[in-house]
Image: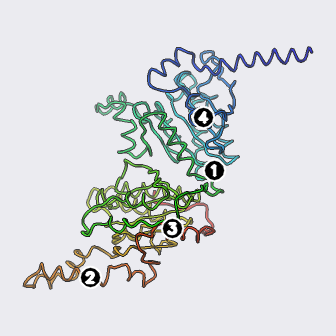
Amino acid sequence: MVIRRVIDDKQDELNELRDKSRSGGGQRRVEAQHKKGKLTARERISLLLDQGTFQELDPFAVERSAESGLAEAVVTGYGKVDGRLTFVYSQDFTVMGGSLSEVVAKKICKVMDHAMSTGAPMVGLIDSAGARIQEGVESLAGYSSIFHRNTRASGVIPQISAILGPAAGGATYSPALTDFIMMVDGIGQMYITGPDVIKSVTGEEVTHEELGGANSHASISGVAHFALESEKECFQELRRLIGFLPQNNSEEPPRTNSKDDPARRDEALPYIIPDDPKLPYDMLDIINRVVDNEDFMEIHKSFAQNILVGFSRMDGRTVGIVAQQPQFLAGVLDINASVKAARFVRFCDAFNIPLVTFIDVPGFMPGTQQEYGGIIRHGAKLIYAYAEATVPKISILTRKAYGGAYIVMSSKNLKGDVNFSWPSGHIAVMGAEGAVNVIHREELKNSDDPDKRRKELVEDYEDKLMNPYIAANLGMIDDVIDPSSTRLHIIHALEMLDNKRDMLPPKKHGSIPL
């Protein structure tokens, strides 16, 4: 009885300490957090994880300063997202501004180590003023330890960051090392140096939101993959994203029971492509009609809009989709589009996600701005990504693929597994008009009616050198298909490639042209 009473007393004491640690920085600071339109660290975890599944780690670990009280500036642990194990750390701005101390870093590193050893996704909820100044180099060393783990975990487990408050200076680099970054408009901010420093050094005046807000990073810098309007929407999309992904690089993506008929035809597909090859159309109209239940989760939606990337399912299988968007810059490949697509292709390859590529590309963007910006180097990243990828690669040529851009987009000689074309597809070194102007320059110059003769030569060039049956005759296109049956052809190809195994030559790693 005495032992039982001692245990009960100790348990009561521990429960009291636990309750105090769960209060964060106290009610006043919690109310201040809510007034800013922000949730607390624990409220965020409850939105991310399935109800009642969160198991906290290190609730009593606090740094030695009395200023932090009984709570530290991060809550760590694990739980489930749709029944699947997921690890999380959530920075607590109510405790010393969410600043990173030695203890905070150790808590984060421990949960990251668990995620790696158990092979489960790692989610970081960022809301921090940065390194704890009172500790000096110890807090900086903590960032180094986190960065090291981000790097080691890359390509092993999915890593996702949600920016739900400030992330400044070195604190930005942990999210930057993760696979996907979500930012909430109005409260999430990322920058290396703040507006005050910029003004003192360069004289430039800029607001916090203009410099590092969600829309700036989602549309201009490309740092953020998602810009969301609220924290609730952020966590809904975060859970949706995790649902497409495998737990780790040794597992296959989750397979769902699709209620969408795999043999479903869509008779509207052939009419999406305009008769005039110069007119744009929305590639999303094609993608949404082909995938399961019109469910396409677009990544980097506001950045480099001339190319589309995102996740969907085909007969319940997760697929990564890469596609030109003719509505923006005619779907041309430029620096940003090349980097955006290359990064996505490499992520899919790392996590065993088949790639489906829809192609309508006129070439690489010309001009001094692109050349001086390194379009050769950045375009090579996309070549490298597709050539290196060993997952199933299926492509559908909807309209045109010219020059080097044809080669880049999962072509047969970059080891594309199955390459389809619609009858509207054209493959050539360049467009027919440009080719005719080069090849028949003298003839057109001496013609009595150059416009009429040019039209005849263009039609002849398209018929003899550009139509997809020529490429199919050479084995560069596996089949010219009825657009209405595109969905069924892709699903059959995915089934055939289900057990594909392809190995790269033994090496430490390649040298991608960064």
**Label 4 – label 1 distance at C-alpha:** 17 Å
Look at 24% across and 69% down and name the residue there: 276
| Label 2, label 3: how far apart the Cα atoms are | 36 Å
Local secondary structure at mark 4? strand
Q: Secondary structure at mark 1?
A: loop
The amino acid type of the residue labelled 1 equals: Gln
Quickly name the residue at label 1.
247
Label of residue 89 in the image: 4
Please give the label number shown on residue 263: 3
Q: Say what secondary structure mark 3 lies in.
A: loop
Residue 461, label in figure: 2
Instruction: Look at the numbered discs 2 and 4 and tell me whether their residues touch, using CB distance below 8 Å.
Output: no
Q: Amino acid at mark 4?
A: Tyr
For badge 2, the amino acid type reads Tyr
The first of marks 4 and 3 along the sequence is: 4
Q: Nearer the viewer, mark 2 or mark 4?
A: 2
* Few, some or many residues within 10 Å of mark 4 (<14, 14–19, 20+): many
